[in-house]
Amino acid sequence: MSTGERATENRAAAIAALTAALTAGLAKDEAVADEAQRAAASPWLASNSLLLIKDRDGVFDTEVAAVSDYRYDDVLIHAARNDPARKFRDVRAGRDLLAAILAERHDWVAGDEFYSCSQAVDYAGLNHESREPGSACSDPDRAGQPCDCGRDARVERLLGILAGVYEDGRP
């Protein structure tokens, strides 16, 4: 195995590990939000000046002054960030970002494939039947070698940023 093939496999393994960590973290967040939503239709109700928190019987019995007393700012921030509806939106956004990042393609220069990325594939299917990495790079010395357009490094960096939310996100 050449050094280039090993580097490509290492980066691919890192991207796969980050993707798996993100997918698992998002699934866990969704499950926690679902459990919280089922436990109480809405564990808190916030207005401009008051935060009402349900007790175990589902009765709004704790009032926290929201505007007039700075001591409760942390409570309000926590409530807003952990509301199940917000968590579901966070999960949906995380999954959309993950899909968008993974969908990024290697640079492919139609008509002058000598300058295409060494991992490029003819995405339009115009000139190549093969979907093997590097099949759309006409430079025989570079085709199939590690990505030289920066796509893999960008994907790994962006996935690492997203996975940083989860303590075990980075391999």
Image (cartoon, rainbow, N blue to C red):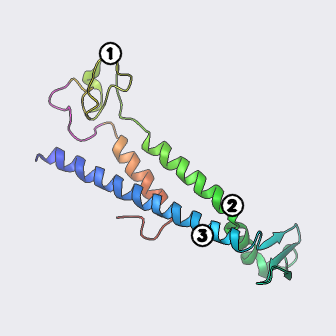
Q: What residue do we see at 68% from left, 61% from top?
A: 86
Q: Which residues are magenta?
A: 139-148
Q: Residues within 10 Å of mark 3 (few under 14, many from 20)?
A: some
Q: Disc number at residue 111?
A: 1
Of callouts 3 and 1, the N-terminal one: 3
Q: Residues within 10 Å of mark 1 (few under 14, many from 20)?
A: few
Q: Residues within 10 Å of mark 2 (few under 14, many from 20)?
A: few
Count of numbered labels shown in the rendering: 3
Indicate yes or no whether the magenta region holds residue 140: yes
Classify residue 70 by image quadrant.
bottom right
Q: What residue do we see at 52% from left, 61% from top?
A: 26
Q: How far across and down, in percent of the image, does residue 77 sit?
A: 72, 71
Name which residue type carries label 2.
Arg
- Residue 53 is left or right of residue 16, and the answer is right
SS at mark 2 in the image: helix
Q: Relative to residue 85, is residue 6 depicted above or below?
A: above
Q: Disc number at residue 32?
A: 3
Q: How far across and down, in percent of the image, does residue 15 sit?
A: 35, 52
Q: What residue do we see at 53% from left, 66% from top?
A: 28
Q: Which residue is mark 2?
A: 86
Which one is closest to the eye, mark 3 or mark 2? 3
Q: Relative to residue 112, is residue 97 depicted above or below?
A: below
Classify residue 50 by image quadrant.
bottom right
SS at mark 1 in the image: loop
Q: CA distance from mark 3 to mark 1?
A: 50 Å
